[in-house]
Amino acid sequence: MHRLSRGLALWVILPLLAACSGKAPTDAAYRAQGAQISSNALFDPARFADVWHVVGAYGAETSCGPLAETWVLTGPQSYQVTGTRCGPNGARAFVAPAQVTGPGRITRDGEVLWVMWVDADYRIAVIGTPDGRFGRILSRSPRPRPDLLTAAREVLDFNGYDPAGLRMVAGG
């Protein structure tokens, strides 16, 4: 086969194979397509404000070590969020406005995040995106109680996230 023909064949076949797997090669989805997902109807923006430690996440985020976010209320339905993200060269600081757009739904940096669950005392939370590209377990403490962590994992599973893909941050 001619070199150009082989390259063209791979260019055609690889996307088809990716389609069969249900995941695009560059846009990992950690949720089952078509799975039900819900946001927390009783979400309280004021109680959500404060420091959250990322104790579990999907993708390479946990490879940077401890990450945290501080959510400061700037209005009844808005926040200023500061924290650290895992980038290609390690942890990087970020600042982003965030707006509550519905019950348990927040838009931050143009991305719609759903708060799927928060325990009754706002000690642990599960957030993610409906398309499944993003999912996290947040905790007020870098070492959450084991029962709360188990409940958070179950919420991700219930909402269609792949339990095998969840990575815990050291200490979580």
Image: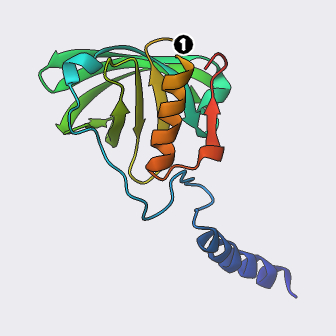
Q: Residue at x 69, y 72 (%)?
A: 14
Q: Which residue is denoted by mark 1 in the rendering?
A: 142
The spot of residue 124 in percent (x, y) is 42, 22
Count of numbered marks: 1
Q: Residue at x 43, y 13 (%)?
A: 140
Find the residue positioned furthest to the bottom.
Answer: 1
State whether residue 110 is above or below residue 84: below
Does the rendering let one see residue 49?
A: yes
* Along the viewing direction, whichever of 82 and 166 lies nearer the viewer: 166
* Image quarter of residue 121: top left
In the image, is 23 to the left or to the right of 126?
right
The spot of residue 134 in percent (x, y) is 48, 42
In the image, is 66 to the left or to the right of 102?
right
Quadrant of the rendering where the N terminus is positioned: bottom right
Check disc 1: other Cα within 10 Å, few if <14, some if 14-19, many if 20+.
some
State whether residue 7 is above or below residue 110: below
Q: Residue at x 63, y 77 (%)?
A: 16
Does the rendering let one see residue 134?
A: no
Q: Residue at x 64, y 19 (%)?
A: 65
Q: Which kind of residue does numbered mark 1 sit on?
A: Pro
SS of the residue at dot 1? loop
In the image, is 38 to the left or to the right of 84?
left
Quadrant of the rendering where the C terminus is positioned: top right
In the image, is 52 to the left or to the right of 114?
right
* Image quarter of residue 146: top right
The spot of residue 135 in percent (x, y) is 48, 39
The spot of residue 49 in percent (x, y) is 28, 16
* Image quarter of residue 120: top left
Find the residue positioned furthest to the left.
Answer: 76
* Along the viewing direction, whichever of 21 and 84 lies nearer the viewer: 21
* Along the viewing direction, whichever of 75 and 103 lies nearer the viewer: 103
